[in-house]
Image (cartoon, helix red, strand yellow):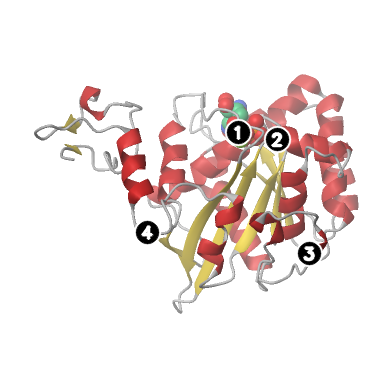
């Protein structure tokens, strides 16, 4: 395989083309070598045949041992209905880190899911006032994105972000025993911390209907939360000013009533017009807050043997 992208920030052909070309040779920035016709499929073929036990893709549930063997990762569950901005948020976090964004007390020290992150980054197309990507997370998907971080003493902290389909969380919100909400149950049982996405745009458009759906999920989150931290994330906060004040205020009051140590933050993925604070600062500040709160990696010790399953992911105990 030969050829290389001339853009500094694009790692093609090792990662997908940042301009979205499936065949690198059709990308004007890709400088091909002799006999080069490299596609993403080729990369997958190479990694699938590799002796490494990980491919760099987002981890699936039964691959969690790949990051739980050397240290005890913190699992952050991103909860919220479909379209709430969960996947876009993760894409933005990685994009910010890639562009030099910093966490308060930690620095980036690696990832086992570089291709998974890069896929998100690659699909996040930022333009003035719109974020057309990523596509909805499939109902069957359960993806874990990994970040290894180091503090100033070189202490390692590993984070896993769980990203599942909002439809599954909505089913779980209505009935936590819903047979199609297994992944939401797993993420809830095993997460060390939670992000609850409050979709401001949905609150503008669907008003109390959207609020109700958020509260269903919030109530399920509160039922066995113990001392695990939760941050309420007002996503698409570029629309928050358009939410009816009565809806905003009552929603906030009800959430404060559900969660001790309630903490909230406003985020957006729109760079323009203006609210850079929402984008550059708050997207990472949400993680800073969770990191501060999660001082014990094993704040969850559920007896997962009770789960009637052979699935390794469902048996994972967060060691
Ligand atoms: N106004 C506004 N829209 C946004 C912002 N971020 C994302 N969106 C829009 O919201 C849509 C849905 O975002 P996703 O990240 O896919 O939402 P999700 O919660 O992962 O959805 P599911 O995977 O279906 O659960 C995107 O396609 C964007 O068009 C934002 O900051 N502001
Ligand atoms: Mg998604």
**Measured Cα–Cα span from mark 4 to mark 3:** 30 Å
Where does ligand 1 appear, by image quarter? top right
- Image quadrant assignment for residue 225: bottom right
Tags 2 and 1 touching, CB below 8 Å: yes
Near mark 1 (Cα within 10 A), the count class, few <14, some 14-19 or many ≥20, is some
Q: CA distance from mark 1 to mark 3?
A: 29 Å
Residue at the disc numbered 4 = 52
Q: Earlier in the sequence, mark 4 or mark 3?
A: 4
What residue would you read off at disc 2? 166
Horizontal relation, residue 53 to residue 198: left or right: left
| Residue shown at the point (49%, 29%) measured from the top left | 272
Does the numbered disc 2 mark a residue whose Cβ is under 8 Å from ligand 1? yes
Q: Earlier in the sequence, mark 4 or mark 2?
A: 4
- 92 or 5: nearer the viewer: 5
Q: Kindly indicate the quadrant of the structure image that contains residue 245.
A: top right
Secondary structure at badge 2 equals helix
Mark 1 Cβ inside 8 Å of ligand 2:
yes
**Between tags 1 and 4, which lies in front?**
4
Of marks 2 and 3, which one's residue comes earlier in the chain? 2
Which residue is label 3 attached to?
A: 305
Q: CA distance from mark 4 to mark 2?
A: 32 Å
Q: Is residue 292 visible?
A: yes
Ranked by sequence position, the earlier of labels 1 and 3 is 1
Say whether mark 4 is within 8 Å of ligand 2. no
Residue 221 percent location from the top left of the image: 82, 50
Secondary element at image label 4: loop
* Mark 3: secondary structure: helix
- Which of pointers 2 and 1 lies earlier in the amino acid sequence? 1
Judge whether 71 appears above or below 244 on screen.
below
Mark 1, residue position:
137
């Amino acid at each position: 395989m030969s050829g290389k992208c001339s853009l500094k920030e694009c790692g093609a052909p090792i990662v997908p083309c940042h301009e979205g070309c499936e065949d690198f040779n059709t990308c004007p920035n890709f400088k091909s070598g002799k006999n080069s016709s490299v596609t993403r499929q080729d990369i997958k073929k190479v990694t699938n045949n590799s002796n490494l036990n990980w491919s760099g893709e987002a981890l699936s549930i039964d691959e969690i041992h790949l990051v739980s063997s050397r240290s005890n990762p913190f699992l952050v569950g991103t909860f919220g209905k479909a379209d709430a901005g969960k996947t876009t948020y993760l894409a933005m976090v990685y994009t910010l880190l890639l562009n030099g964004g910093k966490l308060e007390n930690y620095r980036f020290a690696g990832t086992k899911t570089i291709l998974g992150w890069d896929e998100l980054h690659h699909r996040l197309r930022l333009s003035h006032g719109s974020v057309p990507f990523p596509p909805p997370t499939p109902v069957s998907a359960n993806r874990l994105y990994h970040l290894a971080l180091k503090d100033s003493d070189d202490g390692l902290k590993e984070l896993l972000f769980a990203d599942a389909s909002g439809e599954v969380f909505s089913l779980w919100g209505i009935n936590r025993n819903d047979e199609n909400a297994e992944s939401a149950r797993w993420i809830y049982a095993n997460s060390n911390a939670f992000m609850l996405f409050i979709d401001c745009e949905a609150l503008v458009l669907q008003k109390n209907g959207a609020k109700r759906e958020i509260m269903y999920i919030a109530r399920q989150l509160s039922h066995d939360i113990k001392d695990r931290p939760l941050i309420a994330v007002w996503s698409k906060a570029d629309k928050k000013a358009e939410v009816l004040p009565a809806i905003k205020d009552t929603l906030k009051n009800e959430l404060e009533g559900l969660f001790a140590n309630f903490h909230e933050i406003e985020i957006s993925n729109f760079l323009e017009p203006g609210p850079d604070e929402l984008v550059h600062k708050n997207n990472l500040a949400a993680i800073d807050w969770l990191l501060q709160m999660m001082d014990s990696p094993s704040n969850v010790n559920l007896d997962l043997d009770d789960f009637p399953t052979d699935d390794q992911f469902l048996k994972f105990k967060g060691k």
